[in-house]
Image (spheres, rainbow, N blue to C red):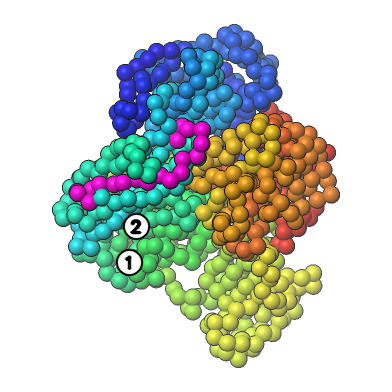
Amino acid sequence: MKITGMLALLLGITPVMAQDTIRFEKALAVQSGSRYGREAVYTDLLSYRLFSNRLQPAEGRLFHRSAAGDSVVWSAVKADENGRFRIFGRRNFQRSNNPFLNPGAVDRGADYLYITYTAPRATAALLRVQGSAGLYINGAPHMGDPYSAGYMHIPVLLKKGLNEMYIRGANVLPELIPLQQPLHLHTDDVTAPHIIISPENSRVKVALVVSNAGTRAATGLSVVSTFLGKSQTSAIFAIPAMATRKIIFEVDASAVSQKGKYPCNLVLKNGSATIHTAGIVLEAVLPSEQYSNTFISPIDGSLQYYAVTPQLGGSKEQEALFLSVHGAGVEAIGQARAYKSKSWGTLVAATNRRPRGFNWEDWGRLDALEVLQMAQEKFKPDPSRIYLTGHSMGGHGTWFLGATYPGKWAAIGPAAGYASLKDYGSADGRIPDSARTEVERFLLRSGNQSDVPRLAANYQALGIYILHGDSDRVVPVTYARQMRELLGGFHKDFSYYEYPGGEHWFGDQSVDWPPLFDYFKWHQRQPDSATHVIDFTTSSPGISATLRWATIYQQIHPLQYSRVQLRRNRAAAAITGNTQNVALLKLALADFTTGTTLQIVLDSTPALSYRVRAAGDSLFLQRTKSGWAVATAPPAADKNPLRYGTFKEAFNHHMVFVVGTGGTAAENEVNRNKAIYDAESWYYRGNGAVDIINDADYTAARYSGRNIILYGNADNNSAWKLLLPESPIQVKRNTITVGNKSVAGDNLAAYFIWPQKNPALLVGVIAATGLKGMQAAYANQYFAGGSGFPDFMVFSDQMLKDGAAGVKLAGFFNNSWRLTSEEMAGNME
């Protein structure tokens, strides 16, 4: 260990915060064989042994024997002159045809570093570990900083004497910063808008991180911003004990009159007392320049931003709108600046919540939809001229969003993109057919939304321009050629261009390619009234349910692909077609005259008659054993497109984490550890912020309209009896019951969802029967973009060493939120 002179300037905070930064000279390293992919199952032998109290690192000591019989031992390693441990070695594991044991995502070299620090006294500190995928300190899990962003500050309480860290990664820079006070502002991860020079300048919203290294939640705080002589006071959310939160405050920008960069002073206060001070810089730009704008996301109440390339000469109503989705590592404002202003429309760049974020799936998908809606409200474009484009990861986003929401776009333009995450950069199974067991099949089925080629028929309604450099070594041109071949079999309107000698990025024309925008200009979205043929596939109504006048409202088998191929004839007053895996179909009848008697024939079953009752009428059709029948709207409590599952859907609607505190001290600690780790992961991956409360503070009235995430079980979380009394999955100390089957042990965990009374809201549950069970659930995969989780899964700590074999049960609720044997797999024995 060595002490450096790198003080708080490195962190963007005032020197009152820290003493000297502590770095480390030596560690032990081991290839543990940890495997984290994009699915629900992960393996981590070191974690398993850590929580089983069977981990004793020592140089040369045997850690385990590989499948090939090789000895894997702890090795001594040294840091470089900057304190970074760079450990690269061979892999001890061969690729497997089992998608849940495939080591494609195993870290190169050392999976884990073991580092110790002997503290002369108990003290609070901030821990930063750049390059780490995750870590434990004194047994508590924390989010790492895999992209070395440098803004991950983890408050920890060092105990007097030996403190132990296990850090997953092979190229990491660990640092400890002892603290002199608990609360601090951090200015290295600011979300801020540009200030557009305008007489209407007023308050703008900004966000940054506050860390609390105290043992109690920090409440009653405010931030005072002073900008060009104007001060503004903003009350801020509570900061949980030993945690961080990205907080929102306002800045009065009314004094800005010319472009430039201006300092903004910030004071963190508790009442009238000053706790900490910091400074940031805000930039003012002309209305004709690219700019960013902030907004509060309803997903979690956090502050997000989007960027704009204004229309040449100023935005005009009923012109075009281009939504651009960026590549990995690219900020939305950088994406916007790659485009020149267009004379015929405005370009808006969404963020995916982070430069890497969620691969434009999951909450990245929702971010794109939020920005699209706000852009439509702000710029009022011609609804027939809305276009989608993106580069690299954004090329994937274009393929994915284009196939998932084909009714929103006139045309799409993927550039340097890959279609499916299951083909690019993933170690997981390509399709559920690659699974070896029924449990694996259910788990892989949960990720069907990411298999874009299975949705390719949806592209029939769109124009498509594919752009790719033929010398691209990051996303090889073979991905574009695969989609060209696929589209060539059925699509009548796509254009394809390989840029000769083009690498992954060949200048701004990699995205701002004139022929692509010319192609867009030739295309308009037809109105629903002129669209009489629909061919639409979805993996889940909860992700995408509607194309034009048809909605797949409920499926027969959740998360299996559903398809409708429909044709309507207004002159003959008829709708005919075929369906696959559709239990409930909703048809909008606005284009039929009131009083018209329709004849409906689906799947060659007997014709149905229905008389259109009024303008804007709609019709539900229910699949029965004998065919199709006219139906009424299902009960609000049933699954519906607003609330369909899977487990990941619970992390939405301004969710609040409710932590069980009614157990033993050790139970309460693991519950809180898990909630803090999830909050850190959500912040790092999704620029997010979440309320964390104790179960005793939860009331239905106070948190009405919000999704709830419960941590604990029925014995230690008092909110359980309020929210889950009717759930067929019950978790208590030492027992999990699913339906009429129970399994005992203190090493079991469960992830599941359950509906609230509000038909749009869910309860998400992270439950365990004991300490080992919650520790097995520590390392979340559900915030990985494109990962698949069913409605429920039950597993033991054996998953950490045996993979999917440790999963006891996985499956989906039916449309009435009931358990059915055909929609689950596993062995609850």
Q: Nearer the viewer, residue 346 or 533?
A: 346
Amino acid beneath label 1: Phe
Residue farthest along the front direction in this orientation: 272
Assign a secondary structure to mark 1: helix
Q: Position of residue 38 (x, y in %)?
A: 57, 40
- CB under 8 Å between callouts 2 and 1? yes
Name the residue rendered at 48%, 78% in the picture.
530
Would you say residue 434 is visible in this rendering? no
Assign a secondary structure to mark 2: strand
Label drawn at residue 157 = none
Q: Position of residue 114 (x, y in %)?
A: 54, 18
Is residue 343 found inside the magenta-colored segment of the image? no
Amino acid beneath label 2: Val
Would you say residue 800 is visible in this rendering? yes
Mark 1, residues whose alpha carbon is within 10 Å: few (<14), some, or many (≥20)? some
Magenta part of the chain:
212-230
Instruction: Name the residue carrying label 1.
Output: 379
Vertical order, 464 against 625 (above or below): above
Residue farthest along the top direction in this orientation: 60
Q: Point out the tag, 2 or 1, that comes first from the N-terminus.
A: 2
Instruction: Name the residue carrying label 2.
Output: 348
Q: Quadrant of residue 328?
A: top left
Q: Position of residue 549 (x, y in %)?
A: 55, 74
Name the residue rendered at 83%, 46% in the picture.
741
| Gap between marks 2 and 1 measured at Cα | 10 Å
Q: Is residue 567 left or right of 239 when viewed as pictured?
A: right
Image quarter of the C terminus: top right
